[in-house]
Amino acid sequence: MAESKAKIKSFSASLCLGGVLVLLLVIVLVGAAMLGAEQLPLFDLNEQQRSIFYDIRLPRILLGACVGASLAVAGAGLQSLLRNPLAEPYLLGVSNGAALGTMLAFVFFQSLEITRPVLAFAGAGLATLAVYRMAKSCAGMNVERLVLSGVIVTTFLSSVIVMLTTLLDAAKLRSFTFWLLGDLSQATRNGVYLSLAAVIIGTIVLTSQARALNLMMVGERDAFDFGVEVSRVRMLVFGASSLVVGAAVAASGSVGYVGLIVPHLVRLSVGSDNRLVVPFSAIAGAIFVVFADTIARTAIAPRELPVGAVTALIGAPMFIYLLRKN
Amino acid sequence: MLEVWDITIRYGERDVLRDVSLSLRDGSIIALLGANGAGKTTLIRALNGTLPLAGGEIELDGCQLSGLSRREIARNIAVVAQENETRFPVTVFEFVLSGRFLHGGAFGWESEGDFEFAEKALAECDLTGYATRLMNHLSGGERQRVVLARAIATNARILLLDEPTANLDLAHQAMMFKLVRRRCLESGASAIVITHDLNLAAEFADEIIMLKHGRIAAKGTPAEVLTAENVADVFGVRVLLDTNPASGNVRVTNVF
């Protein structure tokens, strides 16, 4: 019984950590709401402050939370599915697929706003499938093939994006470049609703497949032997990841390293059980991006940094540290 | 009971298994012998419903295997594969508990019963005290025992073991076979075990099947199959045969 008790004890500790994460998210959200080029008080906002809060800051913060949660759960799901801790929407080219889709919508269907998330989702899905097909050989899939396939797809899509930018005028080009690096400043209520819906659906789908993903982390053949319907799980995880990444990229551009760093940190705290890793990554991802965006908004206020540059500045050294530590 | 009639498995144009038949009765152990590339692992994968048949039939308790769902097959058949490696920090207990995938309690979490099955499997495989250790910190032999424990935790009636003793020391090789034998005697389970150890096969198997180039070269009781002629034909080596003084079973000694 000692093993069960130890497991239950560690599960209780994990639930406590979940509570701490929720509390931290609330603190970060409140802090982010108060901080900015215009400092806002916690209570008794005047008319102008109320307008800043409801029309500009709140949508931006909520969008940041949705984007962070989306990228982190997609990273957690893809890493387990592909049995590779380096799998991440940004490194695998999924974000670039979504970015290309968004850009095609931006260039060719500018009047139809809904085409952006739709094409972003399609782009993310196609990029995921392309990387998966390239990485998988008859002997299976190894780290090197996966990373190389991700690099190939990412660079190919980047060149297509660069070619498409020649169709933009100077003002649009600047705005597009800023967006491409990860930008939450264009947050709208509709964008928030869409991202929120996507991240709720995506997180539920990925969490529902978490137990199967625990077996797939060891190997697809292994999971198949133990009763996992591998192709169904693969389709659901690819679909859910593409949905959340598509929605996130359409709203905020490519915010890198979130999907890589956050699930890593969560695993270090609660182990590899995806039933905890996926939902905890959602909360931790939201904290990370809202925190990074607060830095992006305030570091050189009134000017702003792209949030993607801040996540990369925090994420890259942290990733090197984690690699060395493990 | 697992019945196999004249199955053929084809990779491209090549038949890797041809006209293989066997019958695995409840409570029995079949040892599968053969040189590398003889088709042993392919046969195990076919029996688990992983590979499509180019001919023949497999029946599980009178039902066509091809007509059963993945979950139904996995509830009845557990496989211990040759290689298992994870790059994620998974503890031994979590790994063994994952064998309860098809059972579980509410909301996809394990029940008390699942914990008990996992603990019992750990104890049976001499892994008490390993529960919190990480899988990627174990030696090859320890990992092999954990993989076996996970298969046992499924409580499946049929075990298909692909070289389960490959990385094990002498004591744990015997432990593994005794464990499988005990399960067969006590719960009516049955097993097909791929091994390269002819003496272990002679000691623990009820029946031995020798494969050569994807076909059955010999089939029968250990005494019937383990002959100098069969071993020379299948493995291309000369052996001496006598009787194990402790068990009375046939004993094989390599002649170098």
Image: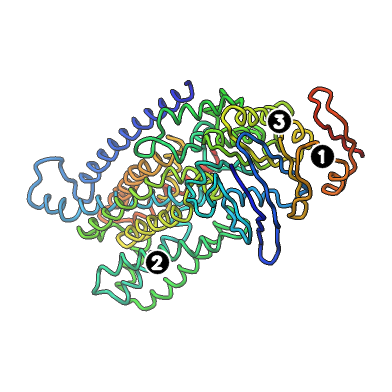
- Image coordinates of residue A190 in percent, x first then y, are 21, 60
Which is closer to the viewer, label 3 or label 2?
3
Residue at the right extreme? B256
- Image coordinates of residue A323 in percent, x first then y, are 53, 43
Q: Quadrant of residue A19?
A: top left
Q: In front here: B178 or A259?
A: B178
Q: CA distance from mark 3 to mark 2?
A: 52 Å
**Mark 3 lies on residue:** B173
Q: In front here: A205 or A114?
A: A205
Q: Quadrant of residue B112?
A: top left
**Could you tell me which chain the residue with mark 3 belongs to?**
B
Q: Residue type at mark 1?
A: Leu
Residue at the front extreme? B62
- Image coordinates of residue A203 in percent, x first then y, are 34, 49
Q: Quadrant of residue A102?
A: bottom left
Q: Is residue A161 visible?
A: yes
Secondary structure, mark 2, is: helix
Using residue B188 as the reference point, say whether residue A28 is left or right of it: left
Which is closer to the viewer, label 1 or label 2?
1
Which is closer to the viewer, label 1 or label 3?
1
Q: Is residue A320 visible?
A: no
Q: Residue type at mark 3?
A: Gln
**Marked residue nearer the N-terminal end (1 or 3):** 3
Q: Say if labels 3 and 2 share a chain.
A: no
**Mark 2 lies on residue:** A123
**Mark 1 lies on residue:** B226
| Mark sitting on residue A128 | none
Q: In front here: B80 or A250?
A: B80
**Could you tell me which chain the residue with mark 1 belongs to?**
B
Q: In front here: A201 or A72?
A: A201
Q: Residues within 10 Å of mark 2 (few under 14, many from 20)?
A: many
